[in-house]
Image: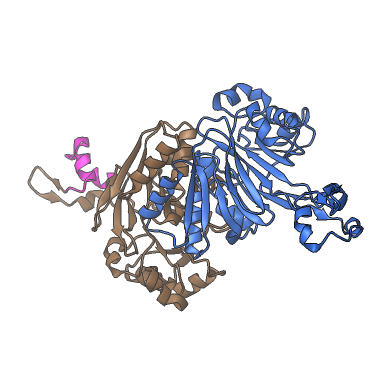
Chain colours: A blue, B brown
Amino acid sequence: MSLRLTILGCHSATPRSHGHTSSQYLEVNNEGFLIDCGEGSQAQLRKYKIKFSRIKRIFISHLHGDHFFGLIGLIATFGLLNRKSELHIHGPKGIKKIILMQLKLTGSWVAYPLHFHELEAMESELIFENDKVEVHTIPLSHRIYTNGFLFREKPLPRNLNMSAISKYPEIEICDYQNLKKGRDYKMDDGSIVPNADLTFDPPKILQYAYCSDTAYDEKIIPHIKGVDLLYHESTFLEDNKDLAEITKHATALEAATIASKADVKQLILGHYSSRYKDTTLFQEEAKIIFPNSVLAEAGKEFILNNQN
Amino acid sequence: MSLRLTILGCHSATPRSHGHTSSQYLEVNNEGFLIDCGEGSQAQLRKYKIKFSRIKRIFISHLHGDHFFGLIGLIATFGLLNRKSELHIHGPKGIKKIILMQLKLTGSWVAYPLHFHELEAMESELIFENDKVEVHTIPLSHRIYTNGFLFREKPLPRNLNMSAISKYPEIEICDYQNLKKGRDYKMDDGSIVPNADLTFDPPKILQYAYCSDTAYDEKIIPHIKGVDLLYHESTFLEDNKDLAEITKHATALEAATIASKADVKQLILGHYSSRYKDTTLFQEEAKIIFPNSVLAEAGKEFILNNQN
């Protein structure tokens, strides 16, 4: 059970030579995802030596330029590099039209299978799952249609307690699958051996929630309750709370309030407005409410392993 | 009379953390132009401290991503920065549709006047002129419709030779305009004083030609004859001449051959393929044919002044 997050960019609005716009690379149990793709993200992927081939799915939160203007370039580059494996794009309705029109007009049609999964639901939905991970949308409150994303590991089977099992000779290998699934064992004499006596808990699942861009909105709390890692935008500090409200962004204090109310384990702050030269101010403000608040910065990694 | 060129990016195909795709900032007599706009160009403009407000016109050579994927981001950023002055985009037919659709779908319509001048002519044409400069297209030979651009200073009026003029008392101030225009002076007795006896040559005009992307094509020579500065793509070295032919790019030796045949004063090489780690090889190859060959690199400036 492992979760590895690399921040590629965490500044708002416009790219700068030392302030890249939103993009993150996430691996959950070795499944590679890209979250948002601001201009210059492909150069950041190269800088941090993330293999393009590991990216199977891209999740785009919303259609503001600082979250997806780098997508067409990345898709075209995959084509130039002769990618063969399929690529899935999950993002708001309209994203398919934007990308396909550019590929067509620029004569750079790609040879690999490119699948779009357009989002328009206003409620949280499961948008991807395999045997390792599931991804749910988190409806956010921004100026345009926006989703955050919750990445949740799939639970592993329970671990067999072989020493306990050996005390019951009638339990056979063919029974193990049921025990791993959590079922109790029924003895030939009709008595029940509770599953908890025969197995250990599997490693606890890990969860990561990405919430950007969004105003302060307590409606997201049930979706992110108890996650191991929460990235919540903090475009402003409290000194610009009015501006945050007008533009439907959050302050660092608001991000911390959400983290606290949702009882998450760690909060990552980001999407900083360029008006603040010193990003440590965001951390100072958030820590008032939520001590385990850390700053996103390009190249920073968050690695979680859970072996119980 | 002055020409100032700043290379923002000069690598082909895909952006890298230390290899930006095509973009150049050019000032001709203080008129600011952007030529091509690969992904990340706006960050490069910031890095080299070029004021966004100085860019009045953007010329796009062709619709391959490494020459224009940064355009939508720059246009949107101008909007976020509350630009008021008009912006003109000159580029191949289709560019207006690509940009407008993205602005519409992303809800980031800009408040400044944005004018498109779409190109589809197959012959060279004058696409912009004011009292300081004129810009002509240079039809290039690439896989899709592509233009280079010739930037030519407008000639200044001839300078009056006041010491010579003073010898002819009947020449009055009201005659000076005609002399500046190069006209001879007709004396009251019908005799002619040649203009060359009464004026000095004005500063020689400066010319810059941008030719990227293109195969080796001698048809461009008449358009770039004698220019002060020629940027000619050299994606490959002669070791990959076959690849250059297939992809309709040029080698460094071919760029130098064009520079030599066109009798230009200086050749700038660029648009390097990422397969070459050592760009000095391009200069070495070009110098065999054309000694005054130099390498483009991000941040490099070329400043020409002509005071005669």
A187 or A201, which is in the foreground? A187
Q: Is residue B174 magenta?
A: yes
Q: Residue furthest front?
A: A189
Residue B210: image x %, image y %?
38, 58
Residue A91 left/right relative to A163: left
The residue segment tinted magenta is B162-183
Residue A219 left/right relative to A69: right
Up/down of A105 relative to B268, above or below? above
Residue A74: image x %, image y %?
51, 54
Taking the spot 37% from the left edge, 73% from the top edge, the residue there is B245
**In this orientation, does residue B220 appear?**
yes
In terms of image quadrants, where is residue B104? top left
B159 or A67, which is in the foreground? A67
B22 or A226, which is in the foreground? A226
Q: Residue furthest left?
A: B190
Taking the spot 62% from the left edge, 53% from the top edge, the residue there is A130
Taking the spot 71% from the left edge, 33% from the top edge, the residue there is A282
